[in-house]
Image: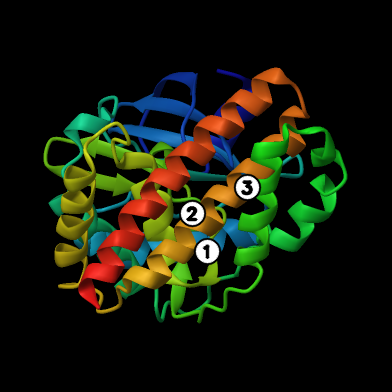
Amino acid sequence: MGREDFTILNEYSIGKILSASNMNQGNTSNAKLINTSQDKYILRKIKDKKQAITEYLISKKLLKHQITSEILLSKNNLPFVIKNSGIYNLQRYIEHYPIKIEEINFSILDETIAFFHSEAVDIKGIYEQEDRFLLNRLWKEVEHSIQSIEMKIKKQLEELINECFNYKHKSNCYIHSNLGIWNLLINKNKIYLIDFGEVRKGNNHFDIAAILSSTLKMNDEDYQIITNINEFRNGYLKKFNDFDWSILRENLNLWFIRGMLALIINKGINQATQELLEKIMHQRNKLDGILMDHIKKKR
């Protein structure tokens, strides 16, 4: 452990520091696992004070449901420490094991997401984060470069982007904004949410789309996929009374197109990118077809 880490940790009442090691957790911070005589903690370097305050307020509100980690206050009663122009926070470590999609319990997952949305409606003092993946911005960056993409996938991308530009969704709560399976922890019969570094006002269906697209087994039969979504819906509505099949379908389209455009920006146009785009588009088309059939049957 470096001297800087030791200096930061001395700002907290956490007992004797025994060890520190690098770890990967979440997407918007650098993290180290800290082992002390009292407990295990995660020391994270984050973007700024606004993120630190926002994450603390969310953690404090969600603790009663035991669906996220506690963020500690420093000896100065602040949810962050500043060291050499860096901003750090400290949270309790949650014991967990690697997530396997086939082991996802949708009746627990729905409750966890619904608790977050219901509590995040009126948390005071949150600093809304910028949406890093605004559709207009992404499209401007790739509009010309996709001309070299294979015609079939290019046509599908253009049709999907044009459809998504027409969507109008109300902002009804704070949303996680990056609620994929990579921001979940599982321990026994509990699911925890982590990394609230991109929280902003939005529509709850965007988070639902993100979590379902990354936890559904897309090689399952259609009936099993819609059964899992229905299971999620039924539990979710018990805690947060807003679930609309058509709005979910639209937000799934938004989630997929944003992901595909970001992939093109990050990886460029090459054979590997095109193959991955085709795979993602296939998953989107399958899920869209399942939802469209379900929506028609409900009319």
* Type of amino acid at the residue the image marks with label 3: Gln
Q: Are marks 2 and 1 in contact (CB under 8 Å)?
A: yes
* Marking on residue 70: none
Residue 33 against residue 297 in the figure, above or below: above
Q: Which residue occupies the foreground of this view, 149 or 52?
A: 149
Please provide percent x and percent y for residue 129: 63, 63
Identify residue type, mark 2. Phe
- Which residue is nearer to you in this view: 3 or 22? 22
Identify which residue is drawn at 53% across, 40% down.
281
Residue 213 image point, x, y percent = 39, 46
Quarter of the picture holding the N terminus: top right
For residue 63, what is the image quadrant?
bottom left
* Nearest the eye: 137 or 145: 145
Disc 3 is placed on an element classified as helix
In the image, 112 versus 258, the foreground residue is: 258
**Residue under numbered circle 1:** 54
From the viewer's perspective, is residue 206 above or below residue 210? below
- Between the residue at mark 1 and the residue at mark 3, the CA separation in whole angstroms equals 38 Å
Q: Is residue 79 visible?
A: no
Mark 2–mark 1 distance (CA, rounded to whole Å)? 8 Å
Residue 67 appears at what percent x and percent y? Answer: 26, 53
View extreme (front): residue: 152
Residue at the disc numbered 3: 156
Which circle, 3 or 2, is nearer the viewer? Answer: 3
The circle drawn on residue 196 is 2
